[in-house]
Amino acid sequence: MRTPRHLPVALVALVTLAAATACSDGGPRGTLPGNGSAGTWFVQSLTTGGKTLTAPPVAQVRFPASESDRATGNYGCNGFIAKVTYDGPGAITVEPGSTTAMACENTEFETAFSKLLTGRLAVEHQTGRLTLKTADGSTIAMSSEPPAPDAPLTATAWTVTSLLSGETAASVPAGAAGKAVFTIAPDGAASGSLGCNRFSAKAAVEGPKVSFGPLTSTRMACQGPQGELEAKLTALFGSGPLDWKVRGDTLTLTAADGSGLTAKAASAAE
């Protein structure tokens, strides 16, 4: 990570303070005075333009208890300072100030977050949750608890929760929920259930891609939702190298044609 140049000393101090506060286990998170929004909030996702972006672990905001202080946080790579006005119980106004200027590898989330966290935002509170909504309906979803660490790709039991087609995600067919589960062992041995039949295969993980060799499976006749799910997973696993990504307890596998799946971590494999 590059060191930001020409950064005001005051900004360095404030960004350092924000990071220290976010990492500290002491003190309440997201529960201080100031419209119920003050405290440290960890960004979970952004929804804008019909697309949802998952937040990197460092994305967060610390809203001050007093309007005489400034909000501090991280857009996903760069730190920032902003002026905050609490507009009654249901709104907040954010006026962005200085930011650091580090070179960042992935700027899509950072760019979107910086654009959304400005101006007058509607505030919705739930226990441990804070949602900010812009005038055009875009949302910033945040939690008072830091994100869970990413589950490992291997040695984790993954339960398939949805099927992907380009930008569209659909839940697994009704009646097949929880039926498709798979694990990739550290030695590359993959096994589990396709929704009906059990299978085994050899998997190879190379950087951000994973490939499954020919599948060997039991031979039960599968119809209905479970058969539909099994056919789609068999085609996906046999389609060549898949891009894989883990965020927290969610795994995404995506083929070159945009088809794919999401799966939740169930438990570490024995």
Image (cartoon, rainbow, N blue to C red):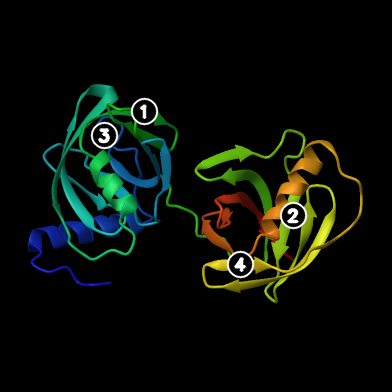
Q: Amino acid at mark 1?
A: Glu
Closer to the chain start, of discs 4 and 1, is 1
Closer to us: 141 or 162 = 162
Residue in the image at 63% along x and 51% along y: 263
Report which residue position mark 4 lands on: 210
Residue in the image at 91% along x and 46% along y: 221
Q: Do residues under tags 1 and 3 come within 8 Å of each other at their CB atoms?
A: no
Q: Do residues under tags 3 and 4 come within 8 Å of each other at their CB atoms?
A: no
The picture places residue 139, in percent across and down from the top left corner, at: 36, 34
Q: Residues within 10 Å of mark 3 (few under 14, many from 20)?
A: few
Closer to the chain start, of discs 3 and 4, is 3
The secondary structure type at the circle numbered 2 is: helix
The picture places residue 208, in percent across and down from the top left corner, at: 52, 67
Q: Amino acid at mark 3?
A: Pro
Closer to the chain start, of discs 1 and 3, is 3
Closer to the chain start, of discs 1 and 2, is 1
Report which residue position mark 2 lands on: 234
On the rendered image, what quadrant is the N terminus found in? Answer: bottom left
The secondary structure type at the circle numbered 1 is: strand
Report which residue position mark 1 lands on: 124
Residue 88 seen in render: yes
Q: CA distance from mark 3 to mark 4?
A: 48 Å
